Amino acid sequence: MKKSKWQIFTNGLFKENPVLILLLGCCSVLAISVTVQGALGMGLALTFVLVGSNVVISLLRKVIPDKVRIPCFIVVVATFVTLVEMVVEAYLPDLYDALGIFLALIVVNCIVLGRAEMFASKNGVVDSLLDGLGMGLGYTLVIVGIAVVRELLGSGTLYGFRIIPEGYQIGIITQTPGGFMMFGFAMALLIFCLRKKGKKFDPRIGCDGNCGNCAAGCANAVTDLKTEDGGLTAKEGSES
């Protein structure tokens, strides 16, 4: 059943949130979520790259040869990342320094390449645009939400403005262990909310049933069976 435009957009926000549900792009979330300014900048940069690369890849999906699709996707993504880097470095040097190497690493971010492979290369321009926008905003919501807590408790500030008096901060929150702690709390909150609604946390939901392109051992995985002539056929597995 074909999804509506609204469903495609909201998938990235809730049902298939790239960070909390699909568990993609977690490295940048842990590293950049120390300040709200850095988190917001990273979220907007990733959203721009996602939308731009999704649109271009969707436009070229019938032209790009299947055997070289991944290198072609990387070239497209790298072009948009370079544009973002140049603009941020020129007009927002402080943000550029705060994001550091993670701005350039958007090129190989699993969210961007994943949506290019699983969605943009198989769908139209409008749907791909909405998918990129939804996934980007879903990522931004998570990283900014974690950054609000980390900056407030760890530094006593919020977007640079002093909220908690100095001397009452929890320093470890702004360090690496604090990033893992806050991410763990976010995951725990998600699972708690899902259980309240009678649902179960299942990161496999992001595969969209494209089992033929996946090597994961999930309930919908493809099981190889030998044919009589020694070749291979595929049969869809059943829920155990």
Image: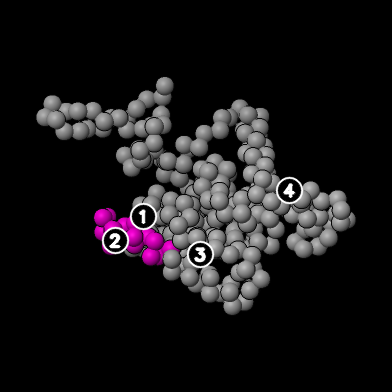
Q: Is residue 102 at all visible to an observer of this figure?
A: yes
Amino acid residing under circle 3 = Ala
Q: Which residues are magenta?
A: 63-77
- Label count reads 4
Measure the C-alpha gap from mark 3 to mark 1: 23 Å
Residue type of the residue flagged with mark 4: Ile
Secondary element at image label 1: loop
- Pointer 2 and pointer 1: residues touching (CB < 8 Å)? yes
The residue wearing badge 3 is 104
Q: Which residue occupies 33% across, 42% down?
A: 213
Mark before the other along the chain sequence, 3 or 2: 2
- The residue furthest bottom is 90
Given this view, does label 3 or label 4 mark the residue nearer the observer? 4
Check whether the beta carbons of the residues at disc 3 and disc 2 lie within 8 A of each other. Answer: no
In percent of width and height, residue 207 lies at: 42, 41
Q: Which residue is mark 4?
A: 172
Q: Quadrant of the N terminus?
A: top left
Q: Is residue 158 left or right of residue 53?
A: right
For marks 3 and 2, give the CA distance: 24 Å
- Asked if residue 87 is positioned above or below residue 109 in the image, the reply reads below
- Image quarter of the C terminus: top left
